[in-house]
Image (cartoon, coloured by chain):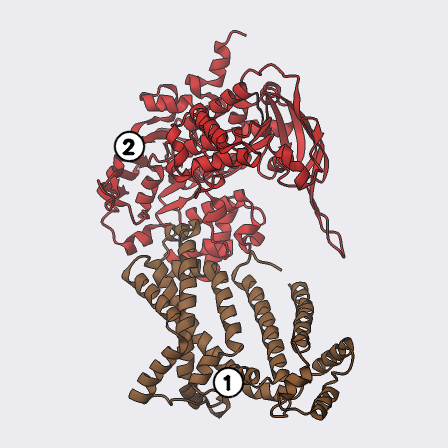
Chain colours: A brown, B red
Amino acid sequence: MLGYILRRILAVIPVMLLVAVFVFALLRLTPGDPAAIIAGDMATPAQLERIREAMGLNQPLHIQFITWVGQLLRGDLGTSLISNTPVSSMIAARFGPTLSIALLTILMSVCLAVPMGVIAAWKHRSAADYAVMSFSVLGFSVPVFVIGYVFILIFSLKLGWFPVQGYTPISSGLGPFLLNAFLPALTLTTIYVALIARMTRANMLEVLGEDYIRTARAKGAPERRVLFRHALKNAAVPILTVIGTGFALLIGGVVVTETVFNIPGIGRLTVDAILARDYPVIQAMILLTSFLYVLVNLVIDLSYSFFDPRIRY
Amino acid sequence: MLFKSRNFDNADIALQAESLTVALPDTPGQPQVLKGIDVTIRQGETVCLVGESGSGKSVTSLAIMGLLPEALKVANGKINLQGQNLLPLTQAQMRELRAARVAMIFQEPMTALNPVLRVGDQIMEVMELHTRLGQSERRKRAKAIMEQVHLPDVDRIFRSYPHQLSGGQRQRIMIAMALVLEPVLLIADEPTTALDVTTQKQILSLIDELQQKHGTAVLFITHDMGVVAEIADTVYVMKHGEIVEHAPVEQLLRHPREEYTHKLLSAVPSLSPRDPRPAGSEVVLSVERLNKIYGGGGILRKLPQAHAAKDVTFTLTRGRTLGIVGESGSGKSTVARCIMRLIDPSSGRIMLDGSDIASLSRGALRPHRKKLQVVFQDPMRSLNPRWTIAQSLIEGPLNYGTSRRDALAEAKRLMGVVGLPEDSLNRYPHQFSGGQRQRIAIARAVMMRPDVLVADEAVSALDVSVQAQVLALLDQLQQEFGIAIVFITHDLRVAAQICDDVIVMQRGEVVEHGPAGEVLGAPAHAYTRALIDAAPGRDWDFQNFRSMSETENAQPA
């Protein structure tokens, strides 16, 4: 097990190196002079030269790469071309909102979706099953921003339960945080519930047909026990995969919800950076999201063995 | 003593099913799956329910447990457990009864235990559900019953997961789980069918031993007449949802009253080998010192090796059948797969029509593939469910350049040869029975006009009467086309009926090799003898309705 974790962590290195090469190439291989791209259309030759000097663009490529990676390893992600602040502190400021809403979303989704999927599978082809399935189709097909605005309309404007927009960090108290974070999380939850409930249902259906479920019933186990003790643990691995990938997507930033609810998160930071051609920020974001993806996947893989003793590393 | 001859007339009735009728209420015509059957099982008695697939044996057991699939409903009749009718009971009342008064063990110990729970916890769960015993008392009782089913190293196995145990050990766990609360009735649904013969023998005697110890009534469901001869007090023969006949075991095997029982018994393949056919001279396949070693890799340290096949050597001439017999893990399938080059042998030579195919590259192997065809155990899974039979049959010849018209004509002809109507070609695999599908699989292999046909447990999933037909078909094809067959099987009866020569394998090694008559008739190796000894019902000559010794005495020496 420990050896496996070590190997997996070591395997992160080549993956990240590949991503780094890609990110590095992104700026250098785009047609035209990087300095010109950075400086914009109105730059004078003197300005261009200054930028080249500052970014080391007049050095040979491999030297540039090594210098850049060296900076990365020291935690220096560069400086934003627009705001002139260090990229790392920009990301740090935006990461909290995204992460906290992602966690809240996943928590709510799992609590709702897993029981829904289990019941749908148990009462296969019943009204309950069709209700869960219809909800799933709906949750997938209605665009997020529509759901978001509908929730704002109902819960904020009509009922006045929640503020329309904004974000309060969790450090100012759980209550104020939840007040702001609940609606965006609920909006995202509709999609994830649809996804996870479907996955749970499909896998539970398969497991419920297994021989050991019949054995459990032959032992006189009540249905609740058959479903949650005998079946769900067996169905866990694929469900876990969906939850994990979903979480990784969420912490990469969800632009639409962040925009609708005016949350200062990672997603908007990325979009703003792309629109402003703020290359250091874009590069840092690509690196960060890939790293988180690899990390989340590692955690998911390791958690498999917790649910299924046949999986041993 | 050949059979059990205990008398149960004075014993209390444990279970009585009276005109039990089970139907499919939502299917048009409401077909009946069980048509008013009567079964009586007394305290301490073993009742065998025998019949071919689809006869309703398993439905009977599930009806007693109250675990019928949703589509099936009890339409009529009574199920009395010690005088109490179970049918009016609520779900909750039935749950209380399961495992406590009626317990069940299933066919597949591999899948009947929950893979993610420790086996000790699974045994303890029964007590958790039905008793008020505390944790430590439950643990004590669980370990005690594990001792009773003769599991070794109880403390370790108690903490093990199912995948860490062998098939026999898992079935012992199932039995422990079923008997821990001392139920009145134990239902055993084909409990040894998935096990090796030697393990089967142990499990059968274990059930016997525990039954005598606890006075349990046993309803034993099986399709295997050999097992019936070993274990039954009373036999009920089922066909199409009806009991055709029931009688004490010896009476039924000696003087079957009904035509169907007669047919069923006659279909049991005999353990005495058939007469060998004349040895051919044209060698089509010869295997020399074939080895297959798994593992042993590893960069930093050497990983443990498994020798799945060790120095296997044999030759096969045109028109002959070579049987490779052995238990699971003996390496018989490894050898078959090496010959077909589905896996690559580690060393050795495989001469097919004079050329060594053991080390050919995938590309270079292609022209030889045609000469080597295979029939697998489960035709349902080896035929593409989305393809018509015609598509499956002509694919091979088309790959080797036969025109579509010629291939289709040949497919039509072969349908006739294997005894299926011509219009079968436009149908799909699920529209056929198991036996028919296996005929199709054989036709598919023969389409390629192979020199060698590898049959990997090709009749193991079939009922005995169908088994006999498929074996006869193989025999006929062999005569017509001169195909040589490598027949992999765990079933000595089948081997005795089809093989000219036999190889017995154990743990990757060939322990005995020779003409079928010698190997099975006068085995030289202890392992071969153990295998033959373990074959259930070996003392009974089923076709002639008498014991083997009576048969021997009847034949003038």
Give x and y (percent) for residue A60. 78, 78
From the image, state whether disc 1 or disc 2 is nearer to you: 1
Q: Residue at x 67, y 82 (%)?
A: A34
Q: What residue is pinned by disc 2?
A: B242
- The amino acid marked with disc number 2 is Glu
Alpha-carbon neighbours of circle 1 within 10 Å: few (<14), some, or many (≥20)? Answer: many
Residue B136 in sight? yes
Q: What residue is pinned by disc 1?
A: A97
- Residue A42 vs residue A26, the one in the foreground: A42
Residue lying furthest top:
B556
Q: Residue at x 44, y 21 (%)?
A: B542
User: Which quadrant of the figure contains the C terminus of chain A?
Assistant: bottom right
| Position above or below: A18 against A177 | above
Give x and y (percent) for residue B17. 27, 38
| Position above or below: B320 against B125 | above
Could you tell me which secondary element the residue under label 2 belongs to? strand
Q: Chain of mark 1?
A: A
- Residue A61 vs residue B436, the one in the foreground: A61
Q: Is residue B514 left or right of residue A67?
A: left
Q: Chain of mark 2?
A: B
Could you tell me which secondary element the residue under label 1 belongs to? helix
Residue B250 in sight? no
- Residue A118 vs residue B454, the one in the foreground: B454
| Position above or below: A211 against B480 | below
- The amino acid marked with disc number 1 is Pro
Q: Is residue A66 left or right of residue B473?
A: right
